[in-house]
Structures are given as structure tokens and as C-alpha cells.
Amino acid sequence: MSKEIEWKRFRVLVTGKCNYRCPFCHNEGQEKQGHTSNMSLDEFKLLIDYLRDKSFVELAISGGEPFVHPQIVEMIEYACQNLTCDVSCATNLSLIKPEQIYRLSKTRVKFNIQYPYTDRDKFSKSTGIGDIDLINRNINFVKDAGLEIGLNTVIQTADTEALSKLLTFVLENQLPLKLLPQIGNDNSKKYREWVFPMIRHFVSSERNKGTGAIRWEITNGQNNTSVLYIDSPCFSNDIETCRNFGELRIHPGLRLQTCISGSLTDALDFSKGDSAITTKLVELWNTFTTC
């Protein structure tokens, strides 16, 4: 039996490139020196082949913007065909093509869409070039194809009007919503003081997941959906919550990063064999003890 690798979630950043310029982005969409390359399809397959018989719960594919990558569909298909865990893709959904949606409708991938505002002007300003009408059309195309889809919103300011419109939008469209206070914003710790009462206006049930996240089921008339608020453990340097979540980030070149704000470590070298890879991952887990 294979030795446990400890990490329960893997985030594979298949590219460092992005067509958006979101000011809140924590490196997943920022073109920075040394972070603009693509992961090769061969590298991706090596990783998936290694993970095939390992015990973990989710493979999250992100970037940058994954659909900048010319082989992103092949990557998602390969992951879904060879893994039994959940497979998700974090994307702004601006570059996806109808033929890609059709192919991916044959997989079990879940789309997590970066969706900062429902207001057209705020959306464009927040993303740099984003066209909310295009995104809304693509959301409907993805839903119509039978693929699971949810919205991710980074809370950047105490904008109650924007959140009210967002809650109305997700209820009308019955789209799950994930709210993430912006990391690095001094006010983020206090956002729950005004966010929670607004959500509870619609709430039918509430559950503290014990992982830094609170989940609500919300309803309005015949419409219902869920809202997940993730109070980042980065705000309090809560390493135990981080370890409970256990997400390892893998960059192009198969370079590793244990923390969203941490440094890259050495790359995985699959020529050394699976045992050496497992040993490396376990060593990383055992040193992931402080913020």
C-alpha cells in the first residue's frame, strides 16, 4: 500500500498568465517575473499519474487564468479520467469556447468562477477588462451543459450595496456563492460584522464547518442556494486550520508552494520514482507547522 502523502488537496497552477488584472489577486492572476510560464501537458500527466492511487479529496486546477493554456481541456479530461477525487477549475470564464464547454460537459469538473461584482462598471474596473455580459452568457452556457458551477467573490471593501445585489443575483440564478475576505486588507477581519447579518436575512440553515468557513443555506421565495464565507486563517496565523485544509500548490515546472504567501520550494522530479516524490511531499507536510 502506498504511503500516505498527508496533503488532502492539490491546487495545480497550470499557467502564470491571465487576461484580467484584478487588484485583489493573490498571485493567481498576476503576471510576475518568473511566474508567466505554462505547465506542460506532460508535466501535468506525470503529476496525475502519480496521484492516481493516492488518498486525497480534491484537485483544483487554476492559474493565472487556466483557459489561457492551449491544452487546458486535455488536462481537465485527463484528471477526470484518472482520478476519483473531486476536480474543480477556478476560472474567470472569459476565454472559454462553446466547443470546450461541450467537451467538458462529458467530465465531472466543477467550475469556480471569479465574480467580483454584479454591476457592469464595477466589474470592468475590478478586473481591468472584464465584460460582465459575456461572463453571464457563459455561465448560462455552462449551466445548460449540465456542469456544476459556483461563484467566488473576494470582498475588497465594505460595500453593502454590492453584496446585496450579489445575494439577489445568486438567489435568482440559484448559484452557490463563496465569499473570501481579501488577504492583505487590514479591514478584512471585520467584514463578518456586516456580511453575516446580510446573509442571515435569507438564511434557512447555518453550519460552522470548523475549518475557518461558515456555510449557509439561503432562500427567497422558491429560489435557494448556498453561501460559504471563508475567514482566512492568514488573518490570525492559524496554522492548525491551514493544516486541516492541507492544500499544496503546484506551479509550472512542478515547483511546490505550501502556503499562498510562502516561497516556492524545489520542483518535483519524477525521474527519481514515486517513493522519492512521496518522501518529499511528506517532508513538506512535516515542516508545514508555522505561518
Image (spheres, rainbow, N blue to C red):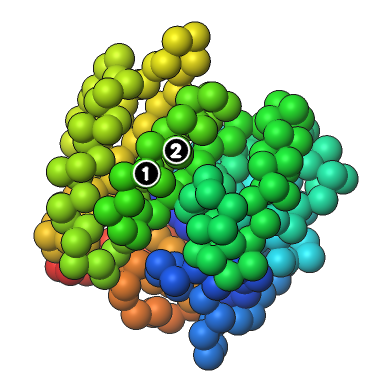
**Residue 208 percent coordinates (x, y):** 20, 30
Q: Is residue 58 above or below residue 270?
A: above
Judge the density around disc 2: few (<14), some (14-19), many (≥20) Cα neighbours within 10 Å: some
Front-most of 63 and 229? 229
Q: Is residue 23 above or below residue 76?
A: below
Report which quarter residue 172 is drawn in: top right
Determine the CA span between mark 1 and mark 2.
Answer: 6 Å
Which residue is pictured at 46% across the width and 18% down the height? Answer: 224
Report which quarter residue 214 is drawn in: top left
Report which quarter residue 290 is drawn in: bottom left
Q: Are marks 1 and 2 in contact (CB under 8 Å)?
A: yes
In the displayed image of the protein, which residue is found farthest to the right? Answer: 99
Residue labelled with disc 1: 161
Whether residue 83 is visible to the viewer of this picture, yes or no, is no
Whether residue 154 is visible to the viewer of this picture, yes or no, is yes
Which residue is pictured at 75% across the width and 52% down the height? Answer: 96
Total residue callouts: 2
Judge the density around disc 1: few (<14), some (14-19), many (≥20) Cα neighbours within 10 Å: few
Which residue is pictured at 63% across the width and 80% down the height? Answer: 37
- Asked which secondary structure carries label 1, the reply is helix
